[in-house]
Amino acid sequence: MSTLLFKDFEEITENDYRAIGFRAGLEIHQQLDTRQKLFCRCPAPHPPYDDFFHIEIARTLRPALSELGEIDPSILMEFKSQKQIIYKINRDTICTYELDQSPPFEINQDALDIAIYYCLKFNAKIVDEIYVCRKYHLDGSIPSGYQRTAMIGLQGFYEFKGKKIHFPEITLEEDAAREISDKYHIREYFTDRLGIPLIEIVTEPSFTSPQEVKEFAEAIRNEFLATGEVRKGSGTLRMDLNISINGSERCEIKGVDKISKIPILGYNEALRQWNLLRLRDALHTRNITPENFKATVYDLHNVLKHTFFYPIQQAIKNNGEVYCIKLPNWAGFLKWPTQRYTTFAQEISERVKVIACLTDYPNIIVSDIIDNTISREEIDKTKKFIGATSNDGFVIVWGPPEDVQIAIEEIKNRAYEATIGVPSESRRALPEGTTAFERVLPGPQRMYPDTDLPHINISKSRVERLRLKLKESFSDRVKWCEAFGFPPSAIKRICTSDRYLLIKELVEKFRIHPNFIVRIFLEFLPFLEKRGLKTKVLTNEQIRTIFAMYSKGEILRTGVFSAIEFAMRGECDKIPSHLYPATNDELEQAYNQAVEFLSQNRIYHNEKRAEILTGYIMRILRGRVEGKTVKEFVAQKLEKENGSNWI
């Protein structure tokens, strides 16, 4: 592996990913479009969420044993951080259930129907009985400390690029709270989205490049949107990437909120794992192995008590501690590159931040990167005090005594893990496309049956009823659009539109041209929305009636736009009386009014006379005559009057 060069993001190919054994799986979490939450009857708000809240509640969570008397490592890690959780609560969207003050209601049947529907859509086997389970979450994102989740389907699959992507499981679960800050020992959440139903689809590690993962995620997202049963907007779709390469453990990247980020996140994680494996091999060449690993701890209080380096100065002033961890033969390894623009020192710093709650940067100093930290004299004093040679490395950490002791253990742990390779962990996606440590990877010990809810029998009649509601797939919709000549740039938006079935009816039944459909649904309706009109009040039946009138010649093409505005304002009764096509006599009368108007006003640019007349007539007969008709009529009139064509 050391002889292989890892190419830049802009140059790497699918063959390069295959060469390092890139494998990825995807977990998709999609909010369902229900009126109420999953286990209570509170309204499920839509994004963008409101940050308004009425009260704050503070809690501290503690771990509990599983059914087998075990505790999951991820739960122990969260407990070690001793976080106080602050919940900002809007009483309009939260009840005592979400705050773990009352038992759950029965599961939301609408959400369950949607989940079964998607299981059928993705060829999964529906379970005969549904048992709700508790999945521990000690990060505070759920006040009870556990998330209720239910297995709905097994062994599903989706046809993608000539192969089947298998879904071992499809589950229905409640969404978590929105984290807004995490500093020191305090973590804050908004609770508005807490409890909203979401479906989770887990794939096998079937993907061999980040680009393939992205394309698959887009395909599944399009299938979701094509059904109209999911929520749209920021935060309604979130994904977790599970990535490994040859010789590494699986790492999970959590909180990927945009499909477009997947390629760079996948690249950086593959690069990180590749570099960590190279680091392991390099450590072994210096006889730094799991069996021979050593780390010695020193108290640097007396060495650095007069430092001018502000972070350490403030720690000592506040009765904090300063310690150094010496790593024999580690010189140069602490600046070993991992992701783009990051080093192994950052891996240590992230652990210290998350588990020891030393969240102010810088939170450590490493021997390989000492610029703009303590002075050269203090570095020499430190090396002499700990007996470090030019071959050794060291890490300095400071802060409150209890936090520093936890930090010391995590620094030693992370350095030891480097001798093994790639630790299996969960990492959070960062905006720039890199990742940061979040927690150790959870195990099966955090899941156990819920005793507050009864099991649910899924009848065959219920499954068959939902099977009959299955809609055509996104790919079938694309084929239909292409067959009828929709512009390529508009096809995706048409296929994922909530009004797709109506659009299909208008084209097939009323013979409406696709370009006119695009003009109305993708341009005019969004334009009205920007003007403050709510397009959701416009029903499909109203649109159907308007286009029926248009196809019969009762209103003109230009009248369709005005008719839609009338309908959105609740003035449908005005459509027949205000938008019937103008007669030739009315056009003549409007022309005479326009001429009279011009005679009373001075025109500085006579070449624009036809344009002014046309615009005036269009205002008089708005929605009742086509612009092309008026333009030709004015041209004929002016030609007769002046013996020349003014157009």
Image (cartoon, helix red, strand yellow):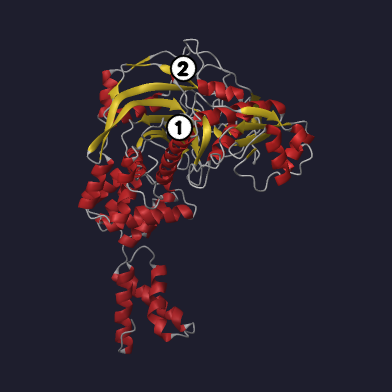
Residue 607 appears in which quarter of the rendering? bottom left
- Residues at marks 2 and 1, CA–CA distance in whole angstroms: 22 Å
Q: Is residue 330 left or right of residue 255?
A: right
The three-letter code of the residue at mark 1 reads Val
Q: Position of residue 482 (x, y in %)?
A: 23, 52
Give the secondary structure at mark 2: helix
Q: Position of residue 443 (x, y in %)?
A: 45, 21
Few, some or many residues within 10 Å of mark 2 (<14, 14–19, 20+): some
Taking the view exactly as shown, the residue that stands out farthest to the bottom is 643
Q: Is residue 531 above or below residue 67?
A: below
Picture disc at residue 445: 2
Identity, as a three-letter code, of the amino acid under mark 2:
Gln
Which picture quadrant has residue 560? Answer: bottom left
Q: Earlier in the sequence, mark 2 or mark 1?
A: 1
Which residue sits at x=55%, y=27%? Answer: 413
**Total labels drawn:** 2
Residue 554 makes an appearance in the image: no
Q: Which residue is mark 1?
A: 422
